[in-house]
Image: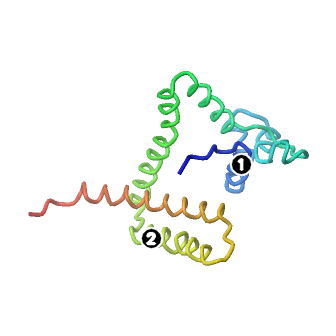
Amino acid sequence: MKTKLPTWKTTHTFFHRLAAYISYGVIASRCGKELQTAEAWGREPESIENPNGTGKKNPFDCVLRLLALAHDKDAGLAREAAEIFSDYVKYLDEKDGKTFVEKGGSVLTIVGEATKEHTDVVYEMLKSPNPDWSKVYSEFKQSEAKYAELGVILKEKVKNAPESN
């Protein structure tokens, strides 16, 4: 299966979804931009398919363009740069996982969240004759994040468990 070019047309949805959790004001503040700029990042930009788009290219778009420039000159550099993002998410998973355990969180709670709140939703969506693949994928990624959190907790428990013969 050939890898499909990711479209820059959808990166605005990440900002829109993030703003639903924290607000465009917080996004603007963290990025050193005006509120209007952050709000525009959450709207679809003008394109041939969307001539009335009012959004702006956002930081994710910029990173993708920079990766393309790097890849043209040095594919290894592009891969190294891209790796920063997945490595940072892994770091956040570990940091958050330890915090969850330190707060008295339960391993069963995480398993329940991954299974009942996300995997069950994916299963139900896939039973539909015309599933919304974007939503299915989003729920799958949510489940994957919970299982990553579970992995961090289990790894910590194994590390701290007394040795058995």
- Dot 1: element: helix
**Residue 68 position in % (x across, y down):** 61, 30
Q: Are marks 2 and 1 in contact (CB under 8 Å)?
A: no
**How packed is label 1: few (under 14 Cα within 10 Å), some, or many (20 or more)?**
some
Q: Residue at x 55, y 75 (%)?
A: 123
Q: Nearer the viewer, residue 32 or 71?
A: 71
Between the residue at mark 2 and the residue at mark 1, the CA separation in whole angstroms equals 32 Å
Q: Which mark is residue 106?
A: none
The residue identified by callout 2 is: 109
**Residue 73 position in % (x across, y down):** 55, 21
Closer to the eye: label 2 or 1: 1
On screen, 146 above or below 96?
below
Please identify the residue farthest to the left as the structure is shown.
165
Q: Residue at x 69, y 54 (%)?
A: 17
Q: Is residue 42 left or right of residue 22?
A: right
On screen, 50 above or below 71?
below
In this rendering, the count of numbered labels is 2
Identity of the amino acid at label 1?
A: Thr
The residue identified by callout 1 is: 10
Q: Nearer the viewer, residue 102 or 32?
A: 32
On screen, 158 above or below 88?
below
**Residue 23 position in % (x across, y down):** 73, 50
Point out the image quarter for the C terminus: bottom left
